[in-house]
Image (cartoon, rainbow, N blue to C red):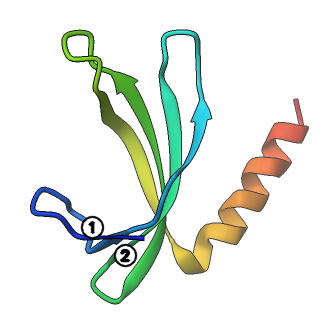
Amino acid sequence: MAQKDSGSFWDEEREPHVISKNDRGDEIHVRRVRRGRSWYCDVRNFYSDKETGEMRPAKGIAIPDDLADEVAEAIIATGKKR
């Protein structure tokens, strides 16, 4: 569990679950984060910076904790309908 650093939007960030996205090295990070008294499930794409090789955040969404289970169930249900 990491506390806020000077450059972070979140007050607290848990270690992410990292999912490999493609052969370019892009990843999806899923982690639990806190801002103030509220907790979220943060799902964000990361890409490898071509110049530095550093992983950088791209688009994503922070889902309020109380909706995370419902959103996860909807994702699973949608994936099964292919």
- Image location of residue 50, percent across then percent down: 26, 10
Which residue is rendered at x = 39% and y = 83% of the image?
38
Q: Position of residue 23 (x, y in %)?
A: 57, 10
69 up-or-down from 37: above or below: above
Q: Please identify the quarter of the rendering in which residue 35 is found.
A: bottom left
Q: Quadrant of the C terminus?
A: top right
Q: Secondary structure at mark 1?
A: loop
Q: Which residue is mark 2?
A: 34
Residue highlighted by disc 1: 10
Q: Residue at 51% across / 30% down in the picture?
A: 27
Q: Amino acid at mark 2?
A: Arg
SS for dot 2 = strand
Contact? badges 1 and 2 (CB < 8 Å): yes
Q: Disc 1 versus disc 2: distance between alpha carbons? A: 6 Å
Looking at the image, residue 79 lies above or below residue 54? below
Circle 1 crowding by C-alpha within 10 Å: few under 14, some 14–19, many from 20: some
